[in-house]
Amino acid sequence: MGRVVIVLMLLTGVIAGAAIYYLQVYAYYEEVSYAPDAVQLTSRTTGMAEPIEVADFAAIDAASSPLRYRACFQTSFSQAALSESYVIVQNAEPRIAPGWFDCFDAAQIGADLDNDAIVFLGTENIQYGIDRVVAIYPDGRGFVWHQINPCGEVVFDGNRPPEDCPPIPESQN
């Protein structure tokens, strides 16, 4: 009888582990359809996000977290031209994508941020405290992800936002 109980406990653990893995890696993600404004960069002059032309766009997102957005694309714009017109972000850190979304390699992108890729502010506060950032390589490859901004770090820790942060939307109070 003891062996049956042990086997049932192990089987339950394996099934629960497989379910948790599936939910984290596959279940909540959805493909994002291409739209003409799919990739935007924030202008240095206006402070507004402006769409740029892209090709070979692929993206995923999940409603379960604002940080799950990832995208890959190709653009014909040079880094030099983009650097003159759009806001550059320092200290960006790409987030790991599920293994099946193979166009987005966060480890490689992160390693390349010091040498090849330049990160631009896509859309500030796409959701309160979350910025969309865009990394672009010299060959035109581009990658997009969401990251917590300084206002979000403070508010998500349960503190009041600093004076230079936008007000918290009523739905998040």
Image (cartoon, rainbow, N blue to C red):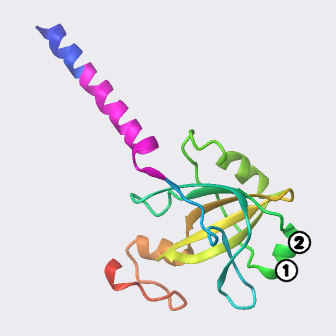
Q: Is residue 110 above or below residue 25?
A: below
Apparent side of residue 105 relative to residue 156 in the rendered image (left or right): right
Residue at 83% over, 75% down:
83
**To which residue does mark 2 refer?**
80
Residue at 67% over, 88% down:
47
Task: Determine which quarter of the picture holds residue 39.
Answer: bottom right
Q: Position of residue 143 (x, y in %)?
A: 69, 58
Q: Position of residue 53 (x, y in %)?
A: 74, 69
Q: Position of residue 145 (x, y in %)?
A: 60, 61
Q: Is residue 73 visible?
A: yes
| Residue type for callout 1 | Glu
The C terminus: image quadrant:
bottom left
User: How packed is label 2: few (under 14 Cα within 10 Å), some, or many (20 or more)?
Assistant: few
Apparent side of residue 49 relative to residue 2 in the rendered image (left or right): right
Query: Which residue is situated farthest in the left direction here?
Result: 1
Task: Determine which quarter of the picture holds residue 19.
Answer: top left
**To which residue does mark 1 refer?**
84
Q: Is residue 164 magenta?
A: no
Q: Nearer the viewer, residue 50 or 15?
A: 50
User: How packed is label 1: few (under 14 Cα within 10 Å), some, or many (20 or more)?
Assistant: few
Which structural element holds mark 1?
A: helix
Q: Is residue 124 above or below residue 142?
A: below
Which structural element holds mark 2?
A: helix
Q: Which residues are magenta?
A: 10-30
Q: Is residue 12 magenta?
A: yes
| Residue type for callout 2 | Ala
The label number, if any, that marks residue 132 in the structure image:
none
Name the dominant secondary structure of the magenta segment.
helix
Number of callouts? 2
- Do labels 1 and 2 touch, CB within 8 Å? yes
